[in-house]
Amino acid sequence: MAGKTERQQAREAVARYHEAMLGVLLKHVADTIDLYRDGELDAFQVDRVMFQYSRAAKELWKFCNMGHVEFTASHVHDDPPIDWWERGAPKPLPGAAPEA
């Protein structure tokens, strides 16, 4: 069992990771809004990105807040990075044509 200091360090590491990953996700949203403002995307395309952001941010939140913080911190430190944006992608409908 980890001591108080180790748990605090783990919480701080997970908090830093969570904030950094939210920044990555928000960059997708910001880039999309810029494209919308430039007239390159329509409102439906922006909505799809916002939906994906919401799903990705929820998955990230669950990862960072559900379970033992020491385990999460070691996973963040030792394992390959997780693509949270991809984790938030809507699942294709059965029989649907792939998107271009």
Image (cartoon, rainbow, N blue to C red):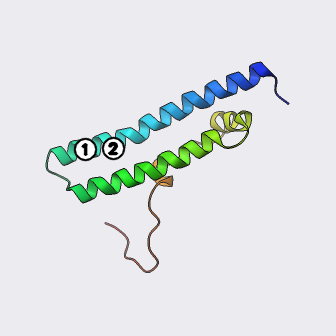
* Dot 2 and dot 1 residues touching (CB under 8 Å): yes
Q: Amino acid at mark 1?
A: Ile
Q: Does residue 83 appear anywhere in the picture?
A: no
Residue lying farthest to the right in this orientation: 1
Residue lying farthest to the top in this orientation: 5
Pick the quarter of the image with the C terminus: bottom left
Pick the quarter of the image with the N terminus: top right
Q: Position of residue 36 (x, y in %)?
A: 20, 48
Which quadrant of the view contains residue 79? top right
Q: Position of residue 27 (x, y in %)?
A: 36, 38
Q: Amino acid at mark 2?
A: Val
Which quadrant of the view contains residue 61? top right
Judge by depth and name the residue closer to the eye, 23 or 98.
23
Q: Does residue 59 appear anywhere in the picture?
A: yes
The residue where tag 2 is placed is: 29
Q: Is residue 82 above or below residue 4?
A: below
The residue where tag 1 is placed is: 33
| Residue under the point 61% across and 44% down | 63
